[in-house]
């Protein structure tokens, strides 16, 4: 693929992935078996919402990065399609997919999705040139790694 991206486009897709995460956790909360699990999942949805705000803030901080020439918005549409189809896939029936899953199973799924997002961003980082803000993609990857730590801690706390 010869398409190159800029940091702004990567931050935009990071925001979309976080919005997808919010939807994932809210749907998981709908099928939760008890009130405690439901609240934990709603808290995780709020965490994803907070992460979206973090990425939006990071995006604003890097506003001086040059934008790539894309008058038809093809790069953004491509990235949106990737985000919606790979990380927190919203094209499937989430409620059906999550029905009957325990909170432990949901957290394990979420950890795997966060790992996939890191691989996704590592690949995208290689498609951003130095002049288009390549170094600004690293904080997104670091933030996603922190999500794995947080989810792993949540999972470990449940088994205590």
Image (tube, rainbow, N blue to C red):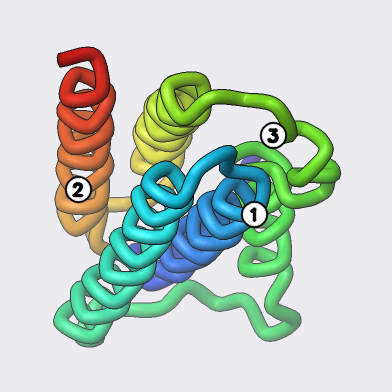
Which mark's residue is nearer the viewer, 3 or 1? 1
User: Is residue 95 visible in the rendered structure shown here?
Assistant: yes
Judge by depth and name the residue closer to the eye, 113 or 30. Answer: 30
Mark nearer the N terminus (2 vs 3): 3
Q: Are marks 2 and 3 in contact (CB under 8 Å)?
A: no
Q: What element carries label 3?
A: helix
User: Is residue 119 visible in the rendered structure shown here?
Assistant: no
Relative to 113, say whether 147 is above or below. Answer: below
Residue name at image x 21 percent, y 80 percent: 57
Relative to 2, say whether 139 is above or below. Answer: below
Name the residue beneath numbered marker 2.
Answer: 143
As measured in the structure, the alpha-carbon distance from the residue carrying label 2 to the one carrying label 3 is 25 Å
As measured in the structure, the alpha-carbon distance from the residue carrying label 2 to the one carrying label 1 is 27 Å
Judge by depth and name the residue closer to the eye, 10 or 103. Answer: 103
Mark nearer the N terminus (3 vs 1): 1
Are there few (<14), some (14-19), or many (20+) residues within 10 Å of tag 3?
A: many
Examine the image and state in which quarter residue 117 appears: top left
Residue name at image x 46 percent, y 70 percent: 12
* Image coords of residue 103 (percent x, y): 46, 30
Query: Tag on residue 98?
Result: 3
Relative to 106, say whether 81 is above or below. Answer: below
């Amino acid at each position: 693929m010869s398409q190159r991206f800029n940091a702004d486009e990567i931050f935009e897709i990071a925001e979309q992935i976080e919005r997808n995460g919010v939807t994932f956790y809210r749907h998981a909360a709908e099928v939760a078996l008890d009130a405690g699990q439901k609240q934990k999942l709603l808290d995780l949805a709020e965490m994803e919402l907070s992460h979206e705000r973090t990425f939006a803030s990071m995006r604003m901080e890097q506003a001086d990065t040059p934008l790539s020439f894309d008058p038809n918005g093809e790069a953004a549409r491509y990235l949106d399609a990737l985000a919606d189809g790979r990380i927190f896939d919203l094209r499937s029936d989430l409620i059906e997919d999550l029905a009957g899953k325990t909170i432990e199973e949901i957290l394990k799924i979420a950890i795997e999705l966060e790992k996939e997002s890191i691989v996704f961003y590592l690949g995208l980082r290689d498609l951003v040139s130095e002049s288009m803000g390549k170094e600004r993609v690293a904080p997104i990857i670091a933030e996603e790694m922190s999500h794995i730590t947080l989810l792993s801690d949540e999972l470990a706390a449940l088994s205590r």
